[in-house]
């Protein structure tokens, strides 16, 4: 996660094709407490909406919000 929470670098060679490691990391990222809204706009230098990892983010609880992936239900009471 880059400073400001707008970009994620995944180091593709560091997780398996099954993506279990990535799913765990994304799940933890989704649950991080924050006073600031998390909105990932770039994943590995690619716009989040066009990233090949977009489906893995949505499976971990993120949803597309305009031009970024944000935790689904963020701000819900």
Image (spheres, grey):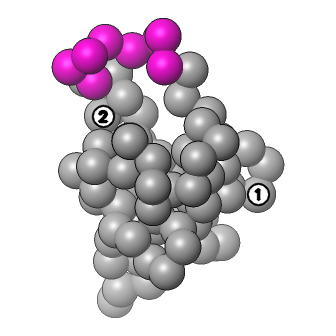
What residue lies at 34% left-to-right and 21% top-to-bottom? 21
- Relative placement, left or right, of 3 versus 49 is right
Q: Which mark is residue 4?
A: 1
Q: Quadrant of the C terminus?
A: bottom left
Nearer the observer, 69 or 73: 69
Which class describes the residues within 10 Å of circle 1: few (<14), some (14-19), or many (20+)? few
Magenta stretch: includes residue 16: yes
Q: Which mark is residue 19?
A: none
> Label 2 near label 1: C-beta < 8 Å?
no
Q: Is residue 60 visible in this depiction of the protein?
A: no
Principal secondary structure, stretch drawn in magenta: loop
Q: Position of residue 2 (x, y in %)?
A: 73, 44
Q: Position of residue 40 (x, y in %)?
A: 57, 59
What residue lies at 59% left-to-right and 47% top-to-bottom? 46
Name which quarter of the figure residue 9 lies in: top right
Instruction: Read off the residue under disc 2.
Output: 23
Q: Is residue 10 above or below residue 69?
A: above
Q: Quadrant of the N terminus?
A: top right
Q: Position of residue 67 (x, y in %)?
A: 54, 73
Task: State which tag comes first along the sequence, 1 or 2.
Answer: 1
Number of numbered discs on residues: 2
- Relative placement, left or right, of 54 versus 46 is left
Under circle 2, the secondary element is: helix
- Relative placement, left or right, of 62 versus 44 is left
What residue lies at 30% left-to-right and 34% top-to-bottom? 23
- Give the extent of the magenta segment: 12-19
What residue lies at 39% left-to-right and 15% top-to-bottom? 15
Q: Position of residue 3 (x, y in %)?
A: 79, 49
């Amino acid at each position: 996660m880059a400073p400001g929470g707008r970009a994620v670098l995944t180091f593709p060679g560091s997780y398996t094709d099954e993506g279990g490691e990535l799913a765990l990391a994304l799940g933890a990222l989704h649950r991080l407490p924050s006073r600031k809204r998390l909105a990932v706009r770039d994943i590995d230098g690619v716009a989040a909406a066009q990233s090949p990892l977009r489906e893995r983010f949505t499976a971990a609880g993120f949803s597309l919000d305009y031009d970024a992936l944000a935790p689904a239900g963020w701000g819900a009471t």
